Image (cartoon, rainbow, N blue to C red):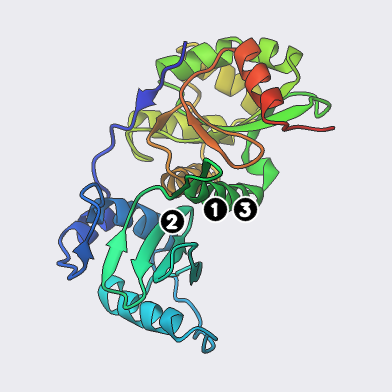
Amino acid sequence: MAGNCRLISAPSPFDQHFLNIQVPLQIMSYSLSLRSIAICLALFVAGVSSAAEPPSADPAIDKIRTALAKRLGDVNLDSIEASPVPGLYEVLIGARLFYVSSDGRYFIQGKMNDLDTGQDLTEVKVSAARKKLLDAVDEKNKIVFGTGKEKHTINVFTDVDCGYCRKLHSQIDKYNKEGIEVRYLAFPRAGVNSESGRKMKSVWCADDRQKALSEAKQGKVPEVKNCDDPVADEYALGKVIGVSGTPALVLENGELIPGYIPPTRLKKLLDSKGLGKK
């Protein structure tokens, strides 16, 4: 059985700001919206100015960078490089991968698959980007359940008021017995300033965070605590890497799997992918 609690937050002020901008890009993917760009750009890299880039050996890359700067403003483009398709370039922003024509005019969101090998080339790049971003999170900002001796480690974006998150946590001992360490990051679906968000701030500020999280997932309202908590940063990070509901599991290779997965089934999945300590 798999399931998750969907994102229910309203657009943030940054999100709304981008929604109001008329961007003269000719979008080739119907599903791409300014909102999807806004979540990626505004919530995580707002106000970040990229340093002047040295000229590239490929003049098309400089042309694309200039064209996107005019349309998207002062946004940090993590990388621009040629894709396997001639004339099409990969633009990585956080953990979102887009494809852009060599003249910077056409902007595409979607999956690129190699039909000869069956490999999802987009997911390979995106998973690597997710892993890099999660590896940069200080472990002290996560609430960890495990001994450190488990074969597998998963990062889980969670909400204390999400039913499937509670179901997952009710089996936390079974995940550990299956050799899976669980590292929780905060993702209050209704937003950082919601009731769930305030609960999660108190949990992350508690003296015994494991106990506070377990009790909150059982329906107990945590004692109000204040500290320099990581909830807002982790919520923004979740948006950047593509979390749209909870629980959201990120495997050791950076693959994102939405929804609850029972312990035994998750163990089989992780083993089948050749992940974990050898």
Q: Nearer the viewer, mark 3 or mark 2?
A: 2
Q: Are marks 1 and 2 in contact (CB under 8 Å)?
A: yes
Q: CA distance from mark 1 to mark 2?
A: 8 Å
Q: CA distance from mark 1 to mark 3?
A: 11 Å
Quadrant location of residue 18?
bottom left
Residue at label 3? 132
Q: Are there few (<14), some (14-19), or many (20+) residues within 10 Å of tag 3?
A: some
Residue 255 at what x, y percent from top left?
A: 56, 38
Q: Are there few (<14), some (14-19), or many (20+) residues within 10 Å of tag 2?
A: many
Residue lying at 66% horizontally and 49% vertically, measured from the top left: 135
Q: Is residue 149 left or right of residue 139?
A: right
43 vs 224, nearest the viewer: 43
**What is the total number of numbered labels drawn onto the structure image?**
3
Q: Are marks 1 and 3 in contact (CB under 8 Å)?
A: no
Picture layout, residue 166 above or below residue 147: above
Three-letter code for the amino acid on which mark 2 is drawn:
Leu
Residue at label 2? 97
Q: Is residue 274 left or right of residue 76?
A: right
Residue 89 at what x, y percent from top left?
A: 43, 68
190 vs 272, nearest the viewer: 272
Residue lying at 31% horizontally and 56% vertically, measured from the top left: 37
Residue lying at 40% horizontally and 21% vertically, measured from the top left: 4
Residue lying at 67% horizontally and 17% vertically, measured from the top left: 268
Q: Are marks 3 and 2 in contact (CB under 8 Å)?
A: no
Compare marks 1 and 2 and give the one earlier in the sequence. Answer: 2
Dot 1 lies on which element? Answer: helix
Residue at label 1? 125
Q: Is residue 212 left or right of residue 241?
A: right
Residue 176 at what x, y percent from top left?
A: 72, 17
Three-letter code for the amino acid on which mark 3 is drawn:
Lys
Dot 3 lies on which element? Answer: helix
